[in-house]
Image (spheres, rainbow, N blue to C red):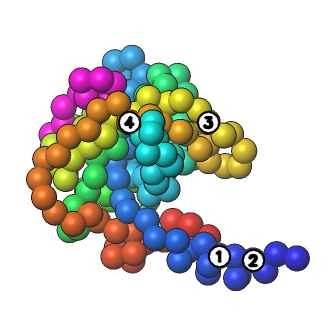
Amino acid sequence: MLDEQAKKTMLRKIPHGLYICGVKDGENLNGFTASWVMQASFEPPLVINCVRKDSGSHEMIKKSGVFALSFLEEGQKDLAAKFFKPQSRVGNKFEDVEFIEGTETGCPLIKDSLGYIECRVVGSVEKGDHTVYVGEVISSGIYREGNPLLLESTGWQYGG
Ligand SMILES: Cc1cc2nc3c(=O)[nH]c(=O)nc-3n(C[C@H](O)[C@H](O)[C@H](O)COP(=O)(O)O)c2cc1C
């Protein structure tokens, strides 16, 4: 029998970073705060990115087959907060955020970040309320040195 409280407590102990996942669908660009991200293979270089099915970005990744991750630095909590609101409610989240479109994917990359990876979707697992997108890293760049923003440091919860 599953002990709901124990499950929640233990799952919340899985450490996470915070990223802005940049997505696109044709001309439409978007981004959302992501935390369920990890490396999944050295060769080829793969990462997994778990994306909620009820988000606008989910459909965009499904259609375009690409996404990018910008790595936030410690202290960039405000930027993370801006991107966890849905585009359907707040409109263009990139309006006052400097970005470039990635050379390989066209997905938005945030200039004020530690750096980025661009990924092509090579697989997916559509089971629960999030889809596990497996992305091959096809481009990467460093903008500056620094420590990553960790979910634990923000006091927010995403998990359980
Ligand atoms: C701390 C935190 C971590 C989050 N991590 C994820 C995540 O890993 N995957 C995900 O799909 N959504 C995650 N979200 C939720 C999305 O940021 C949220 O659903 C966003 O509104 C989606 O934007 P969109 O509808 O414009 O795509 C997280 C939210 C917070 C507050």
Q: Residue at x 44, y 29 (%)?
A: 120
**Disc 3 to disc 1, how far (Cα)?**
25 Å
Q: Is residue 1 above or below residue 121?
A: below
Q: Look at the image and tell me whether residue 138 can be seen.
A: yes
Relative to the observer, which residue lies in front, 3 or 15?
15
Relative to the observer, which residue lies in front, 135 or 9?
135
Q: Is residue 89 left or right of residue 73?
A: right
**Disc 2 to disc 4, how far (Cα)?**
36 Å
Pointer 3: what residue? 124
Q: Look at the image and tell me whether residue 87 can be seen.
A: no
Residue 51, percent from left and from top? 54, 45
Q: Are marks 2 and 1 in contact (CB under 8 Å)?
A: yes
Using the rendered view, name the quadrant where residue 101 is placed: top left
**Disc 3 to disc 2, how far (Cα)?**
27 Å
Under mark 3, the amino acid is Ser
Respond yes or no on whether mark 2 lies under 8 Å from ligand 1.
Answer: no
Pointer 1: what residue? 8
Relative to the observer, which residue lies in front, 1 or 78?
1
**Disc 4 to disc 3, how far (Cα)?**
15 Å
Magenta stretch, main secondary structure, is loop
Q: Nearer the viewer, mark 3 or mark 2?
A: 3
97 inside magenta stretch: yes
Q: Nearer the viewer, mark 4 or mark 3?
A: 4
* Circle 3: element type: strand
Using the rendered view, name the quadrant where residue 31 is placed: top left
Pointer 4: what residue? 137
Sequence-wise, the earlier of marks 4 and 1 is: 1
Q: What residue span does the magenta drawing correspond to?
A: 96-107
* Circle 4: element type: strand
Q: Nearer the viewer, mark 3 or mark 1?
A: 3
Residue 69, percent from left and from top? 34, 44
